[in-house]
Amino acid sequence: MSVRRILSSFWMPALLWAAGLACYHFLMAALKPATGEILPETFPLYAEILPVADAWVAAPVLVFVTWMLLLRWFNGHSGHDPIPIPIVLLFVLAMNVSMAVTRDGFFALAAPFTRITTEYFGDIGKVNDVGDFLRNYSQLSPTLSLHSGTHPPGPVLYLWLATKLVATGTLRKLWLAVAAALVGTSLASVPFYKLARHLYGEKVGRYALGMYVVTPSLVVFGATSMDGVFLLFPMIAVYYFHKSWKEAPIRYSIYTGLALAAGMMFTFATVCVGFVFTIEAILSLRRSPLSKRIWKNLVYAGVTFVAAYWLLFYATGYNLIDVLRTAMRTASMLTGSMYSDILHYFNVSVANLAAFLIGAGIIAVALWWREVWKAWDDWRGRREPDLIAGGFAAAIVVLTFSTLFSTETERVLMFLIPFVLLPAARNLNTYMTARPNSNAWYGVIVLLFVQTLATQLALYTGW
């Protein structure tokens, strides 16, 4: 194999990314920088080394093999037909659950919900009237669990609504909450798949979906953390915003604003999605016939977002700004300042970026980076760039260095991972188109699964 052919392959960048992140880990583990509760041996991930190995390991392997066979069948027999949504939901759910039960069996699904002093489930009993709960949420903050106190009321209300199906029985309510979290997390795959198909076609959509089902952070936290549920509304916003560029601009922009408003009820980090949209709009100014429409749609979405919260305040008294300030004070008291000087700022910011990229999957990051480089080259040459690839690359650097986050970005920012997977799938398709006999897509999905399984079996993340 020639040197030129090696360098043109995405396997070499993948090896370089893996080597670079490994060197970064060992260097930081030796230096032991001050980054909160991140342990040197697992830096920059929030986890501890706690290997497991039992018969449950067969479950995710079996789901993965079935998923690969299904993808192979669709690629060979179904032409341009989409994969049915029920099948998509089934495999996302099956992968998340089967991966979670490798630690402590099915109890692993419920374990995070039993921590009533730290998790949202412990606060559902405080909801008697939804309007009162929203209006008094800031005042309730001292009595709420740790995560409820640093988040909007959406997660508590979501679980409360799910558990309203049964009047009594803590155990039954617990498992209803678990089921609600699993379903909410799985549903996010639908707008992701639809967006991939809308932007790049069915073939890229299948590659993107194949990667989504086995991406490390999306799977490791998919069945045990409410952060998976937080993915749903931002993903709907991403879908409608990019669809509004060419279709029904006003209607889809309004949907975008409503989805962002709903997402902001679950996590304040939803603002990051709006920031990505803004960067995409800025980049479109240089060379895009859609630039004017993108900016108009961004304004429509922003006005809708503001109007939604004005109406909510008028109807219930819920004050988003007041709740945000209260949550920031609570978070500051819990974590203190991790940005006490420039060295700490740099250490934590780089750790934020590295943890996010590891959670997105090293092979996916390598493919994404190739697409980012191409988008940058197109943008400089005043050709039509891929705004998703270029815009998110700029946005994620700004966000991870913004002091808004203090590690754990592999989980906290998991709703941004689709911005990596979409360009990655497009680059994989470009590679496969140039090499019709290649089976590289198998290798990409296998490597993602191996990283996910290794992470789950070697590290205990607390979820």
Image (cartoon, rainbow, N blue to C red):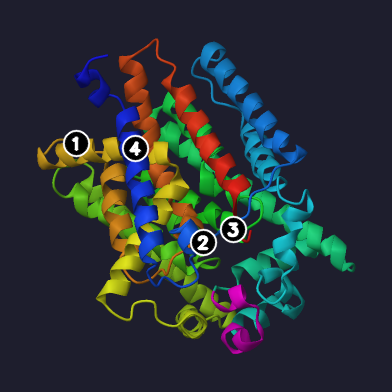
Sequence-earlier tag: 4 or 3: 4
Q: At label 2, which amino acid type do we have?
A: Tyr
Q: Nearer the viewer, mark 4 or mark 3?
A: 3
Q: Nearer the viewer, mark 2 or mark 4?
A: 2
Neighbor class of circle 3 (other Cα within 10 Å; few <14, some 14-19, many 20+) is some
Q: Reply yes or no: does residue 138 show up in magenta.
A: yes
Check residue 445 for magenta coloring.
Answer: no
Q: How far apart are marks 3 and 1 (CA)?
A: 41 Å
Mark nearer the N terminus (1 vs 4): 4
Q: Answer with mark 2 or mark 4, whichever residue precedes in sequence.
A: 2
Label 2 close to label 3 by CB (< 8 Å):
yes
Q: Where is residue 358 in the image (x, y as percent from the top left)?
A: 43, 48
Q: Dots 2 and 4: beta carbons under 8 Å?
A: no
Q: Which of marks 3 and 1 is in front?
A: 3
Which residue ends up furthest to the right in the rendered image?
A: 168
Q: Which residue lies furthest to the left in this view?
A: 381
Q: How far apart are marks 1 and 4 (CA)?
A: 22 Å
* Label 3 element class: loop
Main secondary structure found in the magenta portion: helix
Amino acid at the residue labelled 3: Thr
Hey, what amino acid is under mark 1? Glu
**Residue 116 place in picture, x, y as percent:** 72, 73
Q: What element carries label 2?
A: loop
Which tag, 3 or 1, sits closer to the chain's start?
A: 1
Camera-side residue of 235 and 438: 438
Q: Which amino acid does label 4 sit on?
A: Ala
Residue holding disc 1:
384
Q: Which residue is drawn at 16% across and 50% down?
A: 285
Q: Name the residue under label 4.
A: 366
Q: Quadrant of residue 90?
A: top right
The answer to whether marks 1 and 4 mark residues whose Cβ atoms lie closer than 8 Å is no
- In the rendering, which numbered label is found on residue 46? 2
